Amino acid sequence: MRVVLVSSSPNEIGLTNSCVQICMETLKKANIQTEWIVLNHYDIKKCEACGKRGWGMCLEEHQCRMDDDFNRLKDKIGEFDAMIVVSPVYFYEMSESAKTFFDRLKRCESFDENWKLKGKKMLCIACAGGSGDGTKNTLNSMKILTKFLHMEVVKQVGVTRMNFETIKTEIAEGTKKLMLGENYE
Ligand SMILES: Cc1cc2nc3c(=O)[nH]c(=O)nc-3n(C[C@H](O)[C@H](O)[C@H](O)COP(=O)(O)O)c2cc1C
């Protein structure tokens, strides 16, 4: 069992990374092999919708024609058995770096019979500001993402600074369910 964590906050001491740390600690305690990818550290350009009808080689070849870090990262996350996505909430949505990456991933993998994460589990965590407004919408976008990636949501967690202390247990529990391959809800 190997779990990849994909996060998308530039803030090293923020809520997103605090949630990542809880997941990492839980996985490490169970001796689960883990890799943490921070999307902000990579060169991922926006989709150019390059083909005539809005699809490029992503539709049939399941790769992107652009020469940046995307294809390499896509292949990398395909090496794992489960994924944890942690994003800050920006404007009621997942962050720009997450959107840019997952928009292209959806294109490449929604029609790929050989997509390696097909049928695998995802834990979704959205980290918001004070009110928590926007976590619902962000988690819904993550759920839609799992639909196109043919993955299953084990749990969705909406985090704010106000609920962080109480929600830590839920993040750890969700991580454990992911490791066990169980659905939470
Ligand atoms: C550009 C931007 C847009 C934001 N939009 C929202 C929002 O729509 N709803 C919300 O609750 N918080 C919003 N926030 C607050 C962040 O979600 C919050 O600060 C979160 O903790 C950021 O993650 P971080 O701690 O990892 O940096 C926004 C923050 C930024 C920088």
Image: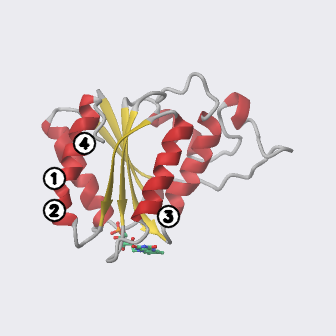
Q: Identify the secondary structure beneath mark 2.
A: helix
- Image quarter where the N terminus lies is top left
**Residue at 20% across, 59% down:** 167
Q: What separation in Å lies between label 3 and label 4 (alpha carbons)?
A: 22 Å
Q: Which is nearer the N-term, disc 4 or disc 2?
A: 2
Which residue in the rendered view is the most extreme toward the top?
Answer: 114
Q: Identify the secondary structure beneath mark 1.
A: helix
Residue behind label 4 places its C-beta within 8 angstroms of ligand 1: no
Rendered location of residue 34, percent (x, y): 29, 38
**Pick the front one: 126 or 115:** 126
Q: Which residue is mark 3?
A: 93
Asked whether, in this view, residue 172 is left or right of residue 90, the answer is left
Residue kind at label 2, given as amino acid type: Thr
**Residue at 71% across, 41% down:** 65
- Labelled disc at residue 175: 4
Query: Do we see residue 132 in this rendering?
Result: yes
**Pick the front one: 3 or 185:** 185
Asked whether, in this view, residue 27 is left or right of residue 36, the answer is left
Q: Which residue is mark 2?
A: 166
- Image quarter where the C terminus lies is top left
**Residue at 21% across, 51% down:** 170
In the rendered view, how is the structure colored? secondary structure
The answer to whether the residues at label 2 and label 1 have Cβ atoms under 8 Å apart is yes
Rendered location of residue 144, percent (x, y): 52, 47
Q: What separation in Å lies between label 4 and label 2 (alpha carbons)?
A: 16 Å
Q: Which is nearer the N-term, disc 3 or disc 1?
A: 3
Q: Which is nearer the N-term, disc 4 or disc 1?
A: 1
Which residue in the rendered view is the most extreme toward the front?
Answer: 185
